Amino acid sequence: MAHGIKALRTLSSPFYQGAGMRPRTPFRSLFRLRPFGTAVLDNPESLLHRKYQPLPETLSPTNAHLLTISLAPYLTPSILPPTFPTVRTQGELHPGYYLAYFPPMFLHESNLLPDGSDSSQSPGGVDGGWPRRMWAGGEVEFAGAGKEALRFGEGAVCEEEVIGVDRKGSTLVPGGGKVFVWFERRYYGGVNNPYGPRDGDGGWDGKKPAVKEKRCLVFMRGAAELEQIENSVKKETRIVKPPNPATFTLTFHPTAHLLFRFSALTFNAHKIHYDTVFASSIERYRATICHGPLSQVFLLELLRMNMDTEKFRVRRFEYRNLAPMFCGEKYTIAGRLRREGDVQVEEGGGKRKGRVYDLWAETPDGGLGVKAMATVEEI
């Protein structure tokens, strides 16, 4: 983990200081709701002991195609029915497409917070002591060619655990403080019995993950942070400009249709993405905002469209969400080749021949909304 966190620090500002780790937990009954406690209101580190059920999945071509047709008006606007892309039924998922699978299938509506988010991921649990959350960033590792992969038609499993908790500010002052929570997700492909136990017949015990993801969510109590959000909406914030010109770009305006479709596809009930009244009156945003994972998929697809996928394979992707991307506003995604040669393709591993790309999303005023870096390996 140390290398990955260090890489994200280099990519952005050093907002993470791990509060601790715990070993992987054994399999528990799949058919229980995700447990959580209400006694962790002022003890965010309790998240380190919270257990999550593995998420089984069968990698149907349907999910990937629904994501493709959701992105198509923005990535390939000139391609319209009847010349629309056919349904892919064989091979590996595109990088980033794993996000269209593994929905929170054990998340009951009673375990949603008032904003529609998952209470089992919040330091405050279902009582909602930390009622606001944002997606801060993360990093993803993809297995090499010919190794573990997520393939259409096969069974797969996602395991999740909290690996770090970091407090910022006074979390004991009413309305104050933030908590950054790091989740690690491991996605296993080629699982014969994804709905059975990890170490049972056809389970995934002993397999290496096809995708390993670390994601950081920031949680806020409400009052003080809400005032900060409101002020940032009313006044010009400091604009972080891209350090170098792009060599490939794509500009579009995300619509409410896109955000709703992505929310539905990922079983995400967080209201800031589809409820305009909630986003403006409760969260004080000027519009609904794009999902953190949606920005991730857009950048990975932009890269895939601008590199030779027969010669190169995405191995690492690190990103930081710097500013909200609002529905209906101009959204420019861009990238450039930073360097090629020997590159680090996995945490703790050796170097391989490949390339490093800078990727980013620009706000309407030309500042950075998302800053990312992708490492690709020569096949």
Image (tube, rainbow, N blue to C red):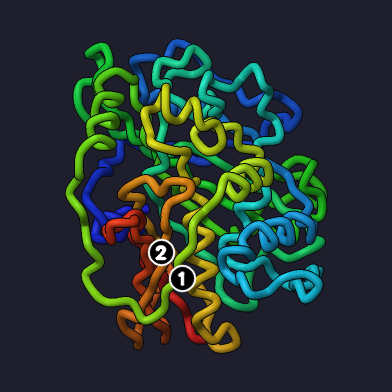
Which secondary structure lies at badge 2? strand
Label 2 neighbourhood size at 10 Å, few (<14), some (14-19), many (20+)? some
Residue drawn at 61 percent across, 70 percent down: 77
Residue drawn at 28 percent across, 57 percent down: 365
* Residue contact between numbered discs 2 and 1, judged by CB atoms under 8 Å: yes
Please tell me which residue lies in front, 116 or 96: 116
Total marks shown come to: 2
Dot 2 amino acid type: Thr
> How far across and down, in percent of the image, does residue 300 sit?
50, 66
Please tell me which residue lies in front, 75 or 198: 75
> How far across and down, in percent of the image, does residue 192 sit?
81, 55
Residue drawn at 65 percent across, 55 percent down: 188
| Side of 193 where 199 appears, left or right | left
Label 1 neighbourhood size at 10 Å, few (<14), some (14-19), many (20+)? some
Q: Quadrant of residue 55?
A: top right
> How far across and down, in percent of the image, does residue 342 sit?
35, 84
